[in-house]
Amino acid sequence: MGNQLNISPSPHIHGKETTEKLMYGVVLALMPAFFASVYFFGTGAIIVTATAVVSCMTFEYLIQRYILRKPISVTDGSALVTGLLLALNLPSNIPVLMIVIGSLVAIGVAKMTFGGLGNNPFNPALVGRVFMLISFPVQMTTWPVASGFKTGYTDAVTGATPLAIIKEGLKNGESLSQLMEKIPTTFSMIIGNMGGSIGEVSALALLIGLIYLLYKKIITWHIPVSVIGSLGAFTAVMWIINPDSYASPVFHILAGGVLLGAIFMATDYVTSPMNPKAMIIYGCGIGILTAIIRIWGAYPEGVSFAILIMNAFVPLMNTYIKPKRFGEEVKHG
Amino acid sequence: MLKTFPIGGIHPPELKLTSDSPIRQLPVPQNITIPITQHIGAPATVMVKKGDSIKTGQLIASVNGFVSSNIHTSVSGIVNKVDTVPDTTGYRQTAVFIDVAGDEWIDTIDRSSDLKKECNLSAEEITKKCLDAGIVGLGGATFPSHVKLSIPKGKKCNVLIINGVECEPYLTSDHRLMLEKGEEIMVGITILMKALVVDKAMIGIENNKKDAIEHLSKLALNYKGITVHPLTVKYPQGAEKQLIKALINREVPSGHLPVDVGAVVHNVGTAFAVYEAVQKNKPLFERVVTITGKSLTNPGNYLVRIGSPVKNLIEAAGGLPEDTGKIINGGPMMGKALNNTDVPVVKGTSGIVLFPDSESKRDEIKPCIRCAKCISACALNLEPHLLATLSLKGLFERAEQERITDCMECGSCSYTCPAGRPLLDYIRLGKSTVIKMARQRNIK
């Protein structure tokens, strides 16, 4: 018996948390948004999601097996999350081949070239999406309008997103009050009845996901609250200064990918800062950059760019923004 | 509102299997091995030689310097030899081997069970008695108590904190002691208060021991200045600095002692040992040890003579289960795994925990996903993932700047890590190297 005793050092117990559980927790939190996308965009949403998930997982497997020759970890859920997030950031009628190329860039370029899970500086799904946006600008900005779950993959009617309507309209000299009549009601924007990427439209579904993530302690409140809060505050100031040329903060938060980005993309563990102070700075950076791109930039939407730009600052923030250590400030009671 | 410390912490399954099991006496074994280092500080100087006839409670190794402690025999009999033995840490060290004959105690010990409340000794006399009786901190750190009672010049203690937290899973020895020896603990606390010249003592107990909180709160009504404080159940609340923060909201700065914020912390077990030493003239030669594990048929709490082999304790608890894969000296968070059961119980042994084989192995190590859960778990707000990486890469100067030496090795980071990374193993490596570097720097 004597030589069968394990003598590893303490601690001798381990919590129940595992990487897989965290990843599948994120997948579960994304389900309301996925179901909402099927409800609003029909077959297209299913085809886009299935393609992205299958190709991301396949590329991860192939690269680990034949190029890196490392142990296969495709079942850890991280490639599944990347695939899902990529899909939810795409229009429902995007050709399958483009999704496969986007997935290859996401997994192959943004994740595996850096050494795989835990080492990538930029959010893989966003790198894939931005690559597609730049490579296939027409297909990536032709948005089917939400027309119900019976909609087929190819027969979707397309139209502009609320953000694009505002951007184009203001450029053409129309006034904001005229434009606001063309965009969906606030209620439609909350439930998701508008054009856009399949996963970004339903604020309600995304907020259910947020509650689940917070409840399961998969993420903390710092990043989502600071992204949404800073975007809201910035656009509120502009709106108060000139309500005729700047849209309201409520519109800015509900339109486009702010909620999807703030809840699921900016909070990606690997590419976000690790202590609360840095998380808030990072979140505010994303919120403000998004507002700047939307208001003054060439693109109507800027969440993806804002997150990628802030991703680049994360190593710097992790090095220079430190939590206050226990006993650092001497208190005399 | 329950009090607790604000930063970090975890809540592992409590598994206090033995909290309802009364303290029983472990039969005195045939042979006893008493190591001469059972405390932090210099090893004691052996006072006996082969063939000496000794009585229970007699001094066999005496204090060697200020930070050191007396060692007494826990049995009567003949000294067989003075030799080395692997102790609970796994290292060989000098110990006195005794063949037990009868159980004859030295005359000065008052063996009656009457409660003796009055104590007319001065602070110096109390401290002297603790030194003579070989009292050390019984919470696990085994720091000599007389040192803690000697407040350095220019510093002042204004509150005594009594640690009844017992935040390690499985262990129940302090819990049972509070229930069964509450009155003695109270007297012990008043003696400690006298020695420290303070008029206030706070007992911190985690809220999973409601009966102990209730019992001691009732007793405290008759003792001036002693209050009982229920605490949220959270590991590592039993750590000195965390308990002080929880109870009086003061942070002991890194590298300083609790007395620097006006507090001194003693364990409930120590308070009981002080009572016995001062009021009954009984040196510290036995203590309560929890023997527990899911597969044991008869886990329980035993009053054990120091030097009894661990295997006797396991025997009393129903014998070593077939499926045993790990034997831990102490709790599962900070205890050390033993490689054999012949090692003796020492002053710092609060419990022996047996793990089945299925729970003894570690998970596979996966890549860090930077989830920051280790940072949230760290009670000192360090960055365990960073300290671990710096240690692995040999960047020890940087690790020192990131305050690796503050780490108290509570293990919350490794416990929490979803990737199953043994963060604390890496940090220990870095910490010991940094301490060595700092020492060499001081020599130059």
Image (cartoon, helix red, strand yellow):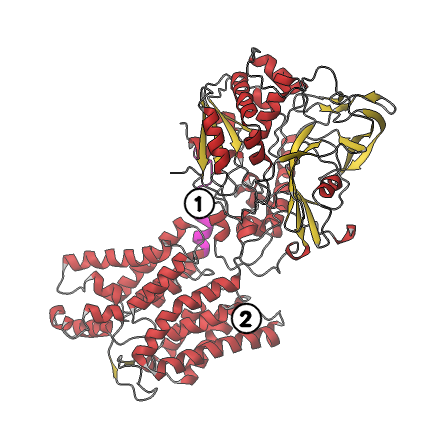
**Mark 2 and mark 1, same subunit?**
yes
Is B34 placed left or right of B4 in the picture? right
For residue A29: magenta?
A: no
Q: Position of residue B416 (x, y in %)?
A: 53, 52
The secondary element bearing badge 1 is classed as loop
The quarter of the displayed image where residue A38 is located: bottom left
The x and y percentages for residue A85 are: 41, 71
Residue A285 image point, x, y percent:
34, 57
Work out whether A234 lies above or below B187.
below
State whether residue B51 is above or below residue A279: above
Q: Chain of mark 2?
A: A
Image quarter of the C terminus of chain B: top right
Disc 1 residue type (three-letter): Pro
Between A210 and B97, the one nearer to me in the picture: B97
Which is nearer the N-term, disc 2 or disc 1? 2
Mark 2 vs 1: CB contact within 8 A: no
**Given the image, what chain letter belongs to the residue carrying mark 1?**
A
Q: Position of residue A48 (x, y in %)?
A: 39, 80
The stretch of residues the image draws in magenta is A315-330
Mark in front: 2 vs 1: 2
Residue on which disc 2 sits = A75
Whole-Å distance between the Cαs marked 2 and 1? 34 Å
**Label 1, on which residue?**
A323
Give the residue type at disc 2. Thr
Residue A118 can be seen in this image: no
Camera-side residue: A197 or B275?
Answer: B275
Judged by its main secondary structure, the magenta piece is loop
A222 to A263, vertically: above or below: above
Residue nearest the viewer, comparing B13 with A78: B13
**Residue A251 or A296: which is nearer the viewer?**
A251
